[in-house]
Each structure stands twice: as structure tokens, then as C-alpha cells.
Amino acid sequence: MSGKRILVVGLGKSGIAAARLLMRQGARVVLNDRRTDVEGLEPLVALGADAQLGHHDAALFTSVDAIVLSPGVPPLPALDAADAAGVPVWSEIELAARFLSGCTVVGITGTNGKSTVTSLIGAMAAKSGRPTFVGGNLGIPFVDVVGTEAAGPDGFVVVELSSFQLERVDTFRANVALLLNITEDHLDRYPGMAEYAAAKARIFHGQRKEDHAIVPAGDEVCASLARAGAAKVHRYAGFTSGDENPKPEVCVVGDALVDQKSGLSFPIAELKIRGGHNLANAASAMLAARLAGIGQDAIVQTLRTFAGLPHRMFFVRERGGVRFYDDSKATNVGATVAALDGFRTDPNFTGKVVLLAGGKDKGGSYAPMVDALRAVGRTVVTLGEAAPLIEAALDDVPFERANDFDDAVVRAAALAKPGDAVVLAPACSSFDMFRSYAERGERFQRAVLALPEVA
């Protein structure tokens, strides 16, 4: 990179981290964002970076040696011009990949569950005693791995990958790559499901025949995408193996998750994360850890202690026999269905779910929620920009529209009966009202904790 003029487009957390790395490598960095009030640029500018803000000019994009693109940057005419001019365009993931040196890389993508699985595998790797980095879409920019022990021959690198991050990878290689599922999401960015799936499938493109690709049993779409790469394909399931061919290597056998190849058996009752979707998450992590060379002791210790992630079916409070859960990370319909199915398949749950749903629409259909709501839902409290679209899809499922976010919590609490669960699983992004799903979840928790006790 030394001496090369490299443009960093999109100056959020990933972009700033990429710029810092490039400057350490001696590159002549140009910083670009359509915003003019970007925080954190002063130290970079003081070191010689050139900031060109407020516009995306094709002349700039075609005058540099390479472009590093942050995942939040949408398609741009200036990027089309760069492609036509032969200027290399890399994601932040691709930039980091060029500095890895012999480490074991585990990459995780999918529409839902990837943060939980990334964290599970990362914790298993860390318990193995080897240097471990966990990041990517999960929160820590992937480029921050560069220069750490984890990036070297003895390290584990566990990275969560969004479709946006995978769009511009070239040499990135995952020794173990997981595609957990593909359901409708981000159709406000992609022309259709085929293009969205193709972006996800790029996780397999750099793999070699000695590598491993992991997909859910019975999912031929994911399997076909994995087979397009060179790696051996493995399967897992969060249920008892039936007629699947080939059989899953890790699945439910009786009351345990069992790795059929290693013989490891883990009692389901000892898992702290609950629901059928989390059985699948745990099964995929068990399989990936074994294929990555992580020992059974580390796998078992992690499964026994891992309590889940914030804003992913996080238990907030019980009030008057009603339990409140923050699943603000459920930013698409598939995640919301998974949350509802988790209650439907839980033998210890005998109530109904009052669902809080709505936010910024992402272009998919809300119809898949209806069957799950008929099975386990009491009512839906709709909110945000997408409320009319959700209501139009609910058919015979009862709903009430909230005036605002706090009103939604109050309405849901009033509608719930003892034994029920009130669940924030919005099926939408948060950007109509909040900066992030985390901010939305924190607001929900505050509102729930503020509810008066039931007399």
C-alpha cells in the first residue's frame, strides 16, 4: 500500500478503521463521505489524509489507485465509473484479508442468527487458549485484526459477514464458512432475492478443496450456493435427523445435541439460550468449531455458559405474570418468525405472544409472520413507518396501532395476560425512529422497566 493513493468511501466505524490501517501502511489516503459533519477525522487529517466531503465525484473515484468501500455505502454512479475505469474496489473485509498470515479464519453469514453463532464460535476459540479475534459485522471492524497475534499462524479469526461486506471481496478466504439461512432482507438495496443470495454466496468463493462449507440440512438453496465453491460441504440441524440426505453431522438426538463424527453429546437442558432457532445456532457452532480444530472441552464449556447477546431475545422483566423480551435485532421478517417459533416449540410456554412490530420497511413481504402469529400470537401492536404494510398482511390476526414507541409498550402490556410474553421483534430496521437496533432495544427496556407494578 505504501505510496499508493487510496480512497476510503464511507466514514463510519469501518471506514475510519480502514483509513487508520492504510495510513500505517504508508498509503496516501483520501477520505470521502456525502456527509460534511463526520466525527473522528481530525487525527487522520493531521497525519496527512485528504478529506473530500459532501459529494461523490466520479473524477475522484477514477483518479485513485484503489477504493476501500464501507458496507453502508449504497450503489453509486461514481463507483460505476471506477469499475469502468478498472480501479480496484475492495470492501473493508477484502482489505483486512490481504494482511492475514496463516491464521484459521471462520466466516459466518446468513440472514438471521449470525451474531449469535459468531459469538459462540468466538468464545469457543478463545477458550481453546489460542489468540482469537471476533469481529466484522458484529461490531469491531475486521481491519482491527491486522497486527494482532490472532492474524498470525497460531490465531483464530472469527468474522461475521453481511451481504454488503461480501459484495466487494476478491482474495478473502474462510477456512470454515457458514451460511446459516437466506430469507427476504435488504430488498430495498437488491433487485431481488437472487442478487441478495449471490452476495451472501461470496463467502464461499475464495475457499479451496481443503476448506469447509457449512449449511443447514434440508436447505437446497444454501447447499447449491456452497457447492459453487471448492470446499467440502457439511450440514447441521436444530432438530432430529429424519429423511435428509446427506444426514446432518450435528443434530438433535433424544434430549441432546450430538456430533455424529466426534461423538460429542451436549444435553439440551444445559443450554442457556432457548428456542428451536438457538438449537440450530448451537449445532452450527459445534460443527464449525470441530472443523476449525477447536477441542471438545472448549466447545462444551462455551455451550454451558453462553447466555446470548443483547437485544436478541433478551429477558427484560416479569410483571404480573407477563414476561417481556427485547429482540430488537429481529430486523427482518425471518428473524421475527424465528422468535415466534421459539415460543411455539417451547414446551414450557403455555401463553400467547403480544408482538411489537414495525419500523422502516426493507422491501420484503410480511405474510410469513401470519402462520406463526396464528399459532402463538395474541395480538400485534404495530408502530412506525411500516405499520400500514404490516397491518395489510395480517389478515385475521388482531392488531392495534400505537401512537408512538412508548405507547406501543403500554398498549402491549395492557393486552397481555398472565403467562403471556410481550416481545419486541420488529421485522424492520430501526432507522425511522432510532439510530440503530441497539438504541431501539434500550428504549424498549427503559419503557418496560418504567411500567408500574401490577397490584
Image (cartoon, rainbow, N blue to C red):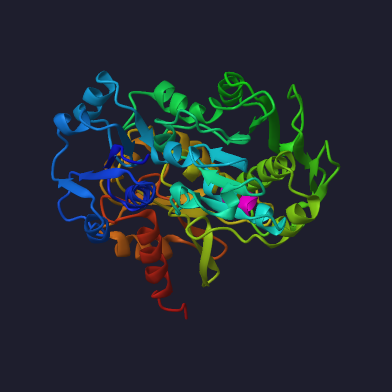
Q: Nearer the viewer, residue 193 or 384?
A: 193
Q: How many marks?
A: 0
Magenta residue span: 118-122
Q: Is 69 situated above or below 36?
A: above
Q: Is 45 situated above or below 53?
A: below
- In the image, what residue occupies the spot 29% across and 21% down? 86
Q: Is 389 situated above or below 208?
A: below
Q: Nearer the viewer, residue 343 or 54?
A: 54
Residue 305, image x, y percentages: 69, 62
Residue ranking furthest to the front: 3
Residue 54, image x, y percentages: 13, 45
Q: Nearer the viewer, residue 452 or 361?
A: 361
Residue ranking furthest to the bottom: 455
Residue 261, image x, y percentages: 83, 36
Residue 369, image x, y percentages: 46, 39
| Residue 114 in view in this figure | yes
Q: Is 26 situated above or below 368?
A: below
- In the image, what residue occupies the spot 26% across and 50% down? 432
Give the side of residue 383 with respect to residue 221, left or right: left
Residue 154 on the magenta span:
no
| Residue 366 in view in this figure | no
Give the side of residue 207 with respect to residue 447, left or right: right
- In the image, what residue occupies the spot 76% across and 32% down? 241
- The picture quadrant where one finds residue 391 is top left
